[in-house]
Each structure stands twice: as structure tokens, then as C-alpha cells.
Image: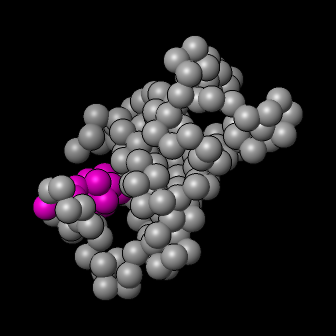
Amino acid sequence: MMEDLAMHLLELLINAVEHKADTIVLEIFISEEDERIYFLVKDNGEGMSEEFLKNATKPFTTTRTTRKVGMGLAFLKSLTDYTDGHLNIDSKINEGTIIRFDVKKDHIDLPPLGDIGETIMFTLSKKPGLDLHFVFKNDNNAFIFDTIKIAEEIGEVDYTNPSIALWLKTYINEGIGNIK
């Protein structure tokens, strides 16, 4: 298992980047009414074949040629199993992948949320020009970070610049903190 939910999300986001996604949507919805946390990671990358998708949550399934181990989706499947959650993966070759999962909000085995700002900061630094739309919401409020809207307002931003990256991490974590 990974130490927090942000690490699971980082694995999914970096996989999307490594599989040629240039647009990613990340949504986190904390529902007090349902007592669940819902996650969505959607990308426009290479996608997975139907055959690969059938085994994607099994340990050691990977498309990597540098190593024969793939554990990210297997760990995510374990997390959802242990926390009374669900995992759904839709993917099509050359169209991208949509991963939806949810967990019981107060489950004893649920790891903490972790540093979402750092996760997004790291993802954006891995691929200059990546369009990332992030929504963090609860039953009443939402925080939205969208690289496309930022570029429309102030022009292109270099998220690999250390000063901007640190600002980004702080900005996102403060935005999330105002929603919790």
C-alpha cells in the first residue's frame, strides 16, 4: 500500500503523462452526505487495449520495458477493496483512460489525503505544456485549478520554475484547506 491517497493519484497522473496525455482532469469529491470520497482521473493519452485492461489491476501487469513490475493499479484496487470502495477503469486505444474510484470516508484503513498540491506540482513539472484541470469539492463548495484558464488570463506559465512550483503547491493546498 501507499502511505497516502496523494501517492495513489501521483501514480495515476504520472502514468497518464508517460502514456502521452497532454490533458488531464483530476477531481476529488468529499461527500459528507454519502460518507464517501470520489475520485476521477481522466486523460487523453494512449489508452489501454481491452486485453490489457482485463489484467490492469493484477500485480506485475505493466507496459514498461524498463522493468517488469507494475503495481500502481494493483495497489489502488487493494485500497478500494480494503476501504469498502469501488474501482472502475474505462480505456480506449488512442482516446485515453478514465479511472473512477471511491472509498468510505471514515474507514479505519483509509490513509490520509496527503499533499495534493505537491502531487499536482510534480505532475506539471514532468511535462511542460500539460493541460491539467483540478477540482476539489465537498457538498457545499469547490476549489478549481485549471492551467488553461490561467494561461488565458496571464499567458503561459513555466511550472518547472522552482518559485512557481512552490507557489503552486501552496496555492493548491490552501485552496483545498478552505474546502475541507
Q: Is residue 176 above or below residue 7?
A: above
Residue stretch rendered in magenta on the structure: 68-81
**Residue extending furthest toward the top:** 163
- x%, y% of residue 158? 63, 29
**Does residue 35 show up?**
no
**Residue extending furthest toward the bottom:** 51
Colour approach in the figure: one colour
Residue 55 is drawn in which quadrant?
Answer: bottom left
Q: Is residue 116 above or below residue 164?
A: below
Residue 65 is drawn in which quadrant?
Answer: bottom left
Residue at 71% x, 41% y is: 146
Quadrant containing the N terminus in the rendered view: top left
Residue 40 is drawn in which quadrant?
Answer: bottom right
- x%, y% of residue 154? 83, 29
Residue at 57% x, 65% y is: 44
Which is the main secondary structure of the residues drawn in magenta? helix
Q: Is residue 165 above or below residue 37?
A: above
Which is nearer the eye, 122 or 80?
122
Q: How many marks?
A: 0
- x%, y% of residue 167? 61, 17
Residue 135 shown in magenta = no
Residue at 36% x, 39% y is: 7
Which is nearer the eye, 7 or 177?
7
Residue at 42% x, 37% y is: 6
Residue 74 shown in magenta = yes
**Does residue 26 show up?**
yes
